[in-house]
Image (cartoon, rainbow, N blue to C red):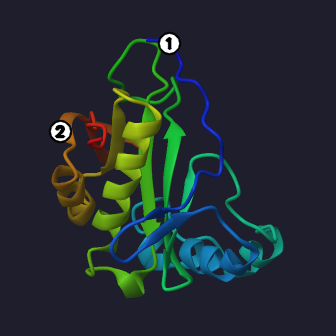
Amino acid sequence: MAEPAPVAWPPVPVRTGRLVLRASEAGDRAAFIELFASSEVGAYIGGPRPRDELERTVPAVPGRRPGLFVVDLDGTMIGMVTFDRRGAERPGHTRAGAGEAELGYLFLPRVWGCGYAAEACAAALGWFAAAYPGGPVVLCTQTANARAVRLAVRLGFTEVERFREWGAEQWFGVCSPAPPPG
């Protein structure tokens, strides 16, 4: 499969019933630091990072890169959704040569359980399907993270395999999002 053509970044903001997926801004810096310093958020991604280190190293406009959407609720960042290429050196692939688009997300613990992750990820998958028609998306999470596995299934990911990585059993799934109608 040929590499998809690049898309302009940042794209026009993606709007849902409650959220806006947009490029990061300087005002998001505190939320980025809170996300990466949170022990709850870090539980399944290698642990939290020290807040003082983050204060020193997080740039004025963090997360400004292709594939990263800030999730905005009423003008405030509550999380992020990302698309990255899955590295060939990592286990878990659906095609020869690897490089699949991998969906990732992080949300502030204070908004967990409100359905924002499902809403934002579904919108991001819809954007991806329109930008890269027919392109599969993969997702990998620790099997111990039952909430993330349930969300993956709810979003339409099908389990492909399980393997050990980062010292834990991983759940690896694939989704081929359908392009939006119209």
* Label 2 to label 1: alpha-carbon separation: 23 Å
Camera-side residue of 167 and 43 = 43
Q: Which residue is mark 1?
A: 2
Residue 165 pos. (x, y %): 40, 41
Q: Is residue 166 visible?
A: no
Q: Residue at x 58, y 71 (%)?
A: 36
Mark 2 Cα within 10 Å, few/some/many (few <14, many 20+)? Answer: some
Q: Is residue 94 visible?
A: yes
Q: Residue at x 46, y 79 (%)?
A: 108
In the rendered image, the vertical position of residue 30 relative to residue 85, given as above or below: below
Which residue type carries mark 1?
A: Ala
Residue 40 pos. (x, y %): 42, 77
For the N terminus, which image quadrant?
top left
Q: Residue at x 40, y 29 (%)?
A: 91
Which residue type carries mark 2?
A: Thr
Callout 2: helix, strand or loop? strand
Camera-side residue of 164 and 13 = 13
- Mark 2 vs mark 1, foreground winner is 1
In the rendered image, the vertical position of residue 53 relative to residue 97, given as above or below: below
Q: Residue at x 44, y 31 (%)?
A: 132
Mark 1 Cα within 10 Å, few/some/many (few <14, many 20+)? Answer: few
Q: Which residue is mark 2?
A: 158
Callout 1: helix, strand or loop? loop
Quarter of the rendering containing residue 145: bottom left
